[in-house]
Each structure stands twice: as C-alpha cells, then as structure tokens.
Amino acid sequence: MLEKNQTYLEVTNLSKSFGSFEAIKNISINIKEGEFVCFLGPSGCGKTTLLRCIAGLEIQSTGSVVQKNKDISNLPPSNRDFGIVFQSYALFPNLTVFSNIAYGLINNKWKKKNVKKRVDDLLDLVNLTDHALKYSSQLSGGEQQRVALARALATSPGLLLLDEPLSALDAKVRVFLRKQIRDLQRKLGVTTIMVTHDQAEAQTMADRIFVMKDGEIIQSGTPNEIYTKANSPFIASFIGSMNFIPAIISNSSQVKCNNVEINCDTGNFQENESVQIAIRPEDIQFTKEKSDDNILIAKIKEIEFLGAFQRIYFESKIVTDDLIMVDVLSSNARKINLSVNDELNLYFSKEDTRVYSI
C-alpha cells in the first residue's frame, strides 16, 4: 500500500480524439493516495472523457495512465482497480438493494457469508439498512445514489470514480449527499476523482480542483487557491461571481476606470494597456469614511434576496456602465435598512482587486 501523499495515479501526455475532434489535449496530472480531486468545467470541456480514459471505458489516442506504479493504459476496465458511480445510477431494476450491492462480490466469487457481512456493513455505512429488500423503483433519487455508491465500494477498490453523481438530484438532497460522500471518502481513505460542472460541489468536496476548458486543464489547486487566485477571467467568473470593470493601466499601482484612479497591483502589465479589474461581490463593503483608497459613490438599483445573503446591484457610472454587484449578509442588510435609490460609498481594498487582460 502506498503511503499518504505518494502518487497513486499518474496521467501523462494523454490525448483523446474522436475523428478530427480532439476531446482531450495532452493532459498530465498526478493524484495522491487518499486524495479527493474534482475535474471541473462546463459541458463539453472533456472532463467525462478524461474520467472514462482513466477507467478504460475509452482508450486514449496517445499518452499513458499509471496506477500504483503499474501502467494500465491498455488494460480493459475489468482489469483495472476502480469502482464507478454514474449520473444515472445504473442500478439493476430487477434486483433488490442488497443484490445490487452484492453483484460485484458474487461475480468475484466471494463466499455467501462474506457477501452478507460486506453488504450489511455497506448498508450501514450509507444508512440504508432498512431498505435492503426494496427495489430501485421504491427508492428516492438520493437513496438510489447511495446504493450506487455502496455498490461501487463493495469490492474495496483503490480508486473511486464519480461521474456527475449529484446532478440529477434536487438542491437539498445534493447538499446532504455531497457532505455524506465527502465524510465517507475521508473515513475510508479511498482515492477519489469526481467529475462535475457545479463549482459549489467542487469547492465543498475536493482537496484539489482541476479546471478544464476545451479539452485542457487550465488551472489546478486547492478550492481556496482556485477561488482567490484565479489565473484567468474565465475561471474567475466560472468559480463564483465577479465584477469586471474595463480599465487602462496608469502605473505599477493604479489603473484608470473612466478617469477614476483605482489602486491595485498591476503586475506585469504595461502603462496605457487596456485591461479589466475584477472584484468579488463579497469583497465590496459599505463605508461612511472619506478616503482616497478605492471608494466609489454608488446608487442602489436593485436588491435581490437570496436567503442568507442579499445581492445588491449598484450604479456608479463614473467608473462603469455596468451594474456593480455587492453581497451582504441578510442580517446586516436588515440592520442598515437598504432601499432602492439609496446612495452609499462602496469600498474595496487594493489587495482584493485583481487585474486581467481583456
């Protein structure tokens, strides 16, 4: 068994083409023993194709896949060490919950008494003991997905693959299951790869995220790194919400937005270069203080109630023709008693202001 933090899965220069269409382009990644990683990106970016190549359900055009120091690039799925959960659950409708979970064990010639103990343990693990003799048609979507998860784990695979496992479920069940799956993964220590287009799932479940676009991995890192240090406007807007404001570089510490100077680190951009600054809605605050540091006078145009917080849209034509989003906790918004057409000072620090090319 590999020690934690050692490489468990290594994908090198992997590409996959379907005719003239290149779905995956020269991808190389390393995944550590016991790590939970997410392939995150919009539909059609290649994330499911990459997962299927790792599983052997698709054969790569070029490149290699190595699992626990063994090259599995050309092995059929039956000879690879993984369990998989599909978006559609793929349960056998003619089998009970117990028999669905036991299916792989019976195929692997487990003894009857060992099968029963293993399935009973898994039913307890996913809190479905009372549903053992039910059929899939008698279960909710969330319960079916837990059966699929238990079945994938039945043979104790070294690698767990999850292909959009929560996308068919309603919002409340998704929140419940993403925590249950993450807790289960931590308890078992199984190396896990999940494909998702849902940034909230990736942010809450993954140790590390690989963001994909057009068949390539364009950034990887922890959820916090991806969110706070997005390396492109695409990632900055795909992961959470972002205000983008056109600007011109003034010097190494300032940009100009419609002749209003904004303090920020302009990095390697050149003077007079056209850029855009980016500020997260939660990084903008209200202030009554007078200061020269990134304070804008703005008028409320719309208030959107989103439960725990409110998204307030401000107009500040001195810097941009677009509305500026500001997120405020609902408890704080009630204390301030905000209304449409109120004028406020908006403050954002130079540290929270990012600069991107257009």
Image (cartoon, rainbow, N blue to C red):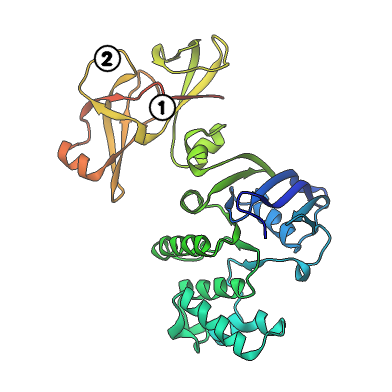
Three-letter code, disc 1: Asp
Point 21% across, 19% down: residue:
289
Question: In terms of sequence position, does the residue under pointer 2 or pointer 1 come before the other?
Answer: 2
Q: Is residue 57 above or below residue 62?
A: below
Label disc, if present, on residue 310 of the rendered structure = none
* Front residue of this view, candidates 53 and 1: 1
- Residue 94 in sight from this viewpoint: no
Question: SS for tag 1?
Answer: loop
Q: Is residue 335 above or below residue 348?
A: below
Q: CA distance from mark 2 to mark 1?
A: 17 Å
Q: Is residue 292 above or below residue 180?
A: above
The residue singled out by tag 1 in the image is 352
Q: What x and y, as percent, mark residue 220? A: 60, 41
Point 64% across, 74% down: residue:
155
Q: What x and y, as percent, mark residue 192? A: 60, 58
Residue 356, image quadrant = top right
Label disc, if present, on residue 291 of the rendered structure = 2
Point 17% across, 42% down: residue:
334
Q: Dot 2: within a 10 Å radius of its alpha carbon, few (fewer than 14), some, or many (20 or more) residues?
A: few
* Front residue of this view, candidates 41 and 313: 41
In-image side of 282 versus 144 (left or right): left
In-image side of 279 versus 341 (left or right): right
* Front residue of this view, candidates 224 and 164: 224
Residue 279, image quadrant = top left
Quadrant in the picture for the N terminus? bottom right
Q: Is residue 250 above or below residue 227?
A: above
Three-letter code, disc 2: Ser
